[in-house]
Amino acid sequence: MTSRIDKNIIGYGDYDEEAESLHLGANSISLFLILCVCVIVAFKLDYLQWSYLKGLNEDLAFFIGLFSIIFGMGFYNYWRLGERSSYYLNIARTPTVPKDTIVLFEYKGYTCGVGYQPNTKTLEFPPLVRKVICVGILFNVALVTLDNSGFEKIKSLPSAFEPSTSEFCPEDDDGLDTTTIPAGCELIIRAYKLGYAKNLGACEPKKIDPEKMQVCRKRRYDEPYLHYMWRLLISSLKKQEAVFNRENLEKITDKFELQVNNLETLKDYKTYAINAAPRASHHIWTDLPYPQHIIIQKYREYLDPNYCLEQFQKQTNTIAVDANDERRNSKLLEHVYGHLLFNPKSKLTVGYCKEYKIHWNSDPDICEKLAANPERVLRDENALPEVKKVLHRHDVAKAILTLEDNLSEIESENDNESAENGTAKGSAPGYGEQGGARGSHRKRKKDVKTKIAKSKQEIRNKNEIVSFQCFMRSTEPNRKSNVSELTFDDTKFTVRTRYFPALETGGESQIAMYNGLAKLLANSFHYSQLTSRSEVKIEGVTKETPDVEQFLEKPSYLMARLDILKNVDIFLGNSWVLEREDLLKVYPYHVHLQNYVNKFREKYQERHGRL
Amino acid sequence: MSRTNFWVRMFMLLYVTVSLMTVSLNSGAAEPYLKDNRVAYVENVLQAFRQTKLQKIFNTFSYINAVEKNNCRSTLSDLKVQCLLSFARKNCSAAGSARLQEICELYSDIIVVNKLSEHVFISRSERYHLTRNSNLDFRTVLTNRLRQKYGKLVTQYTLTSWSDCKKDDLKCVAAGLDQFCLDYTNSNSLSWQYCMSASLWFIGTSKQD
């Protein structure tokens, strides 16, 4: 009974009834699998979309067809895919498996294995189907590897190897014209020649100074290759001679030795740049729970490290949180933190989200522990390697600047000597090649100085690129912040703990979160009427204007009346707006939020930032 | 006795009904920007555009433009809003019946808001380029460009699921526009009333008259 069912399932062909086994030819299986992989890859990369296929230009379409047929048939013949397979995949009832079969797996009384027997009758695709599969594989390969622009580049490759006319000196040098006629002046010049105009005005041909013209050192059209090569060699040797004189050699040796002595620093500097190592490490600890489920949070942390870039790119102005959601404060904190530091709508960029970390679910006294034993706490929080790397990068950057300074000193010392020698020889100042060289040297020296000075300014202190803060919930209203200090890597860091009251939902909670977090990140930040975008109320002028709240309660001109909210900054208090759910819905958050964030970032970047 | 009871009961019922109505009306007046009130207002505006001839609307538009340029020039935005509203109200008071005055106030509101939002839709530099690169008069060029921008906004709205409304279902359109503009203002730098007025103006003046 079972064997009848099996036969029905397996269908026609090379079913060994006695052994109750099926031999599938390795050639056919391999071809089929390769085709499947090719089709899946091409499909995933959108190369099998009808719109893409329609967009292929005719030359490329013809080429892909030709390529797939020729190489497909070549593939078929070279690998002798038309012959019967020597290896086969054997599917058989477990007791009937031949002894020489390598068993892959067993399932419900059936065994799947690989066997080798050159003369075994195996189940194969008909030869025509195998040929079609080969062509199909090569078709997919060609489709994935070539597109319209790539094919055009291949087509234009031969012409790229042809020498360009711009590499030759112009042929027409005997009739050197020392004047050029400005464009569009032909008629005026003709009128002048005929006596209709007294002068040429702006069309006066400008004379070319033959002294300023340079000798063309490119290849001439009739110049043999060997001659041109000889000329290039001689000019190169002359240049090398000028470079490798005794003074320069000394300079090069000194510079080389200096660089060898700082090899480790140079290696670290390059490694950090290539690995895109962090340039800052800022940490905030909070006792709030994760804003998302821990699995999602960990997935993003380890498997999607770039998630924050996307998340803060598309932030909305406000966030709606459910009053019953136990993670509401965490969500709010994450939203506010994104706006204050990373949202690209603000004109100032102060941080890179991958260099900032909020440590959720932390102990309320973590900052005290951190101040007492920074290395241990940072290790426990998996922050130590990053912090150490950033601090080391800072040291490397400083060392590199000193190195650059020393290198430029060597450069300038030798140049000074050569300049003094030049003056001693009695050359007239500012005239001839030596005068020019001195001038360019002075300029170069100035450039180097400026560059280094600027770089030194840009390097921030260690406690500006690494920071530790705590943002904790408190049941006591208006609980004062704690400030402690810790020393790590010979640098003093201030650790600030700020407490915020448990927040309810609504507009008031968002504003409280903004103010709390802004104060934690930049303690000197203060937002007032002067920094707000709302217009300043002037005594006497604004006295007669009706109260804004009453103004917004009138039933007519509902939309025009809302314009007045532009001058009601909720970041300054104005609790009456925060209490009105209807107004909060249509409140122009973006106006005041952007201003608030800009002002915050101006203050924040004074003390914090990146290397 | 029973007759007296009946009248007392009727009086009590009437009192309770009137009280409830007053409370509900007051709450609507106190919070005119609640969702239902907003949708009802937008629906009324759409209705007002339908019931008014385009020429009349454009006359009001020209009037508000002139007033803004002359009588209501102020650097203090609050004063400007109040000035424009008082002139718009004065203009509408001459519209005729109370119903016509109400209709006039509805579309005047949209015109005033669009006037106030001009600088948001067309920045100073864009305004400069428009005047430099066109042969037409400035006002026409500006109006055409604004119309393009309003059209873009309405196109974005029609691509959302909130625009799935029957042609005459103004309540559905109003609710859809309200939701679209709430979302738009939350993700972009455009106030709700600016988004709403721009969309309403484009929809309202796109009718065949």
Image (cartoon, coloured by chain):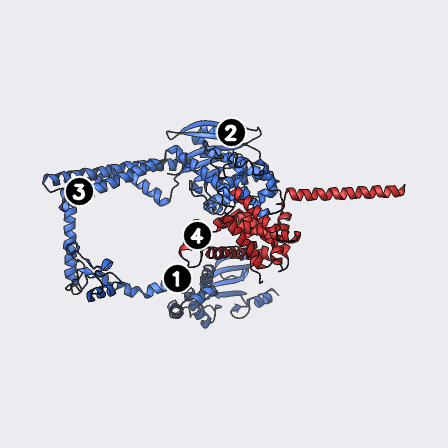
Chain colours: A blue, B red
**Residue B181 or residue A375, whichever sits in front:** B181
Label 4 neighbour load within 10 Å: few <14, some 14-19, many 20+? some
Q: Give the residue at mark 1.
A: A145
> Residue A61: x percent and y percent?
40, 69
**Residue A21 or residue A228, whichever sits in front:** A228
Chain at numbered mark 4 = B
- The answer to the question of whether label 1 and label 3 lie on touching residues, with beta carbons closer than 8 A, is no
Is A262 left or right of B107, judged from the image as shown? left
Chain at numbered mark 2 = A
Q: Give the residue at mark 4.
A: B127
Picture quadrant of residue A5: bottom right
Do callouts 4 and 3 point to residues on the same chain? no
- Residue farthest toward the bottom in the current orientation of the protein: A128
Relative to A286, say whether A211 is above or below.
below
Is A567 left or right of A455, judged from the image as shown? right
Q: Quadrant of the N terminus of chain A?
A: bottom right
Q: Give the residue at mark 3.
A: A438
Q: What element carries label 2?
A: loop
Do callouts 1 and 3 point to residues on the same chain? yes
Label 2 neighbour load within 10 Å: few <14, some 14-19, many 20+? some
Identify the disc placed on residue A365: 2
Q: Looking at the image, can residue A290 be seen?
A: no
Identify the disc placed on residue A514: none
Q: What element carries label 3?
A: helix
Label 1 neighbour load within 10 Å: few <14, some 14-19, many 20+? few
Label 3 neighbour load within 10 Å: few <14, some 14-19, many 20+? many
Q: How far apart are marks 3 and 2 (CA)?
A: 64 Å
